[in-house]
Amino acid sequence: MRPDSPMTMVLPEQQVRERVHRLVPELWGTLADLVRHRSVAANPDPPLAVTAHTIAKLFQQAGLSTAKVDTITHGDKTSAPLVLADEVAHPGVTTVLLYGHYDVQPADLTQWTTKPFEPIEKMDEHHDMRLYGRGAADDKSGVVMHLGAIKALRGDRGQLPLNIKLVLEGEEESGTSVLERYLTANPDDPRFQADLVIIADSGNVERGAPTLTETLRGIIAADVVVETLAAKVDSGMYGGPVPDAFMALVQILATLQDRKTGDVAIAGLTQYDHTWPTVSEATYRRDAGVLPATSLIGSGTIAKLLYGKPSINVVGLSGLPLVSGAQNLLCAKAKAKISMRLAPDQDPDAAYAALEAHIMAAAPWGLKPVVKRTASGSGFIAATGEHSKEIERALLEAYHASTVAKAGQGGSIPLVNAFQVANPDADIVLWGCEEPVAHAHGADESVSQSELEHMTLAEALLLQSVMSPIPIQAG
Ligand SMILES: [Zn+2]
């Protein structure tokens, strides 16, 4: 057999497993280094470009010589730095696009028991090591999975018979993605075309239970402003005849959910029917930290409420002083940020129109609130492509498991939908290390070392299974 023949590129599963296992200490150290980067979304200081350059270098060292930092411009907006690579082994072989994001959510220090940007390790009750820190799971683990899978397969063997595109973005958590809007408007851009798209920004239904994410909810967010007075005035001198802006606003907000059932009370929203694995009330309560005296709300199973139905919350409020600084003054202007998760197939524009109409109709005393959309993204429903068998097999082998869970995710990754529109025939794999205990977006975020190892192995096995023979020239 020729030394560069594609058959020699396929390693026995046990050998890939050993290679990944030997890489774990290095990947774990790389992940800890990346957690030290305060790459908070939309944070100009320190600049995200520092993290992007660090990551580009890691992939260059792993053999992706085309890895570089770049930006995308759409309209008058330029994206946060992206790490892109485009390794063409041969035009005829499978093209894989690896996606992740290196930006992270802000960390509310009052809620953390560890320091979010000073990673530390702790052994859990399963004798599994966990790394604590903001972004350890969401989504620097995804970046490291891609790195590990490439390193494990390449070793010192040079180029693989695979075309590899890398897309690591720095604005997934910022609510608006220039790349998403660009890709939606330019679905034919060859930089984002692939046969297989691997999104490492999700997780197993529980640690050790291999899972593919089949649906994602969409998202919209809007600010609502109510203004009733030129300035704050004394409640003794003027209170009574004039509506207080805050009191008017809370009347509107109170109508967003049904008072009895807790369901979203906005007319015109859709829900999506699908068979997701059951989410038990006990598990949900434990993972979310629901207090014992709190009853759950909403109609339908927990899985349906989490993955298939819309939900609505007020996530920010301004206009009133803190209680400690309160005086007897009427509120002149009050503002709330409303965040909605949408059924996977709901059109975000239609959902926003329904929300706006609801708010205008709910405003009391003839007031005209001002509503402004601040975020918008489509959900996702996975299509089955030609590599679906290899995808499941890679997960089963990595975990030595007999079944793969097909789950939904309540969160949103609007770019996934854009990837699907740009690659209608591709398989889109959504997986990763963000199992429930990881507390992505929450306090004390962490990642499991065994999940990082198994998911890196699954990805390496998948990449290997879609490698296609390079046509060998005669002679
Ligand atoms: Zn994420």
Image (tube, rainbow, N blue to C red):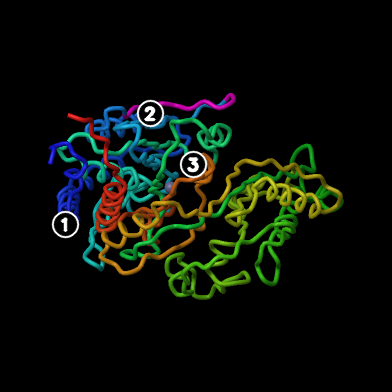
Total numbered circles:
3
Residue under the image location 50 percent in, 47 percent down: 413
Say whether disc 1 or disc 3 marks the residue closer to the N-terminus: 1
The mark closer to the camera, 2 or 3, is 3
Residue 427 on the magenta span? no
Would you say the residues marked 2 and 1 are in contact, meaning their CB atoms lie under 8 Å apart?
A: no
Image location of residue 210, percent across then percent down: 34, 62
Left or right? Give the position of 31 relative to 2.
Answer: right
Name the residue tied to disc 1.
14
Q: Which segment is the magenta one? A: 67-76
Q: Can you tell me whether the CB of the residue at mark 3 lies under 8 Å from the nearest atom of ligand 1?
A: no
Quarter of the picture containing the C terminus is: top left
Name the residue tied to disc 3.
423
Residue under the image location 60 percent in, 42 percent down: 375
Q: Judge the density around disc 2: few (<14), some (14-19), many (≥20) Cα neighbours within 10 Å.
A: some
Local SS, label 2: helix
Tell me the kind of residue under disc 2: Ala
Local SS, label 1: helix
Name the residue tied to disc 2.
49
Quarter of the picture containing the N terminus is: top left
Left or right? Give the position of 428 relative to 469.
Answer: right
Viewer-side residue, 54 vs 228: 54
Left or right? Give the position of 406 relative to 394.
Answer: right
Tell me the kind of residue under disc 3: Asn
Residue 91, quarter of the rendered image: top left
Q: CA distance from mark 2 to mark 3?
A: 28 Å
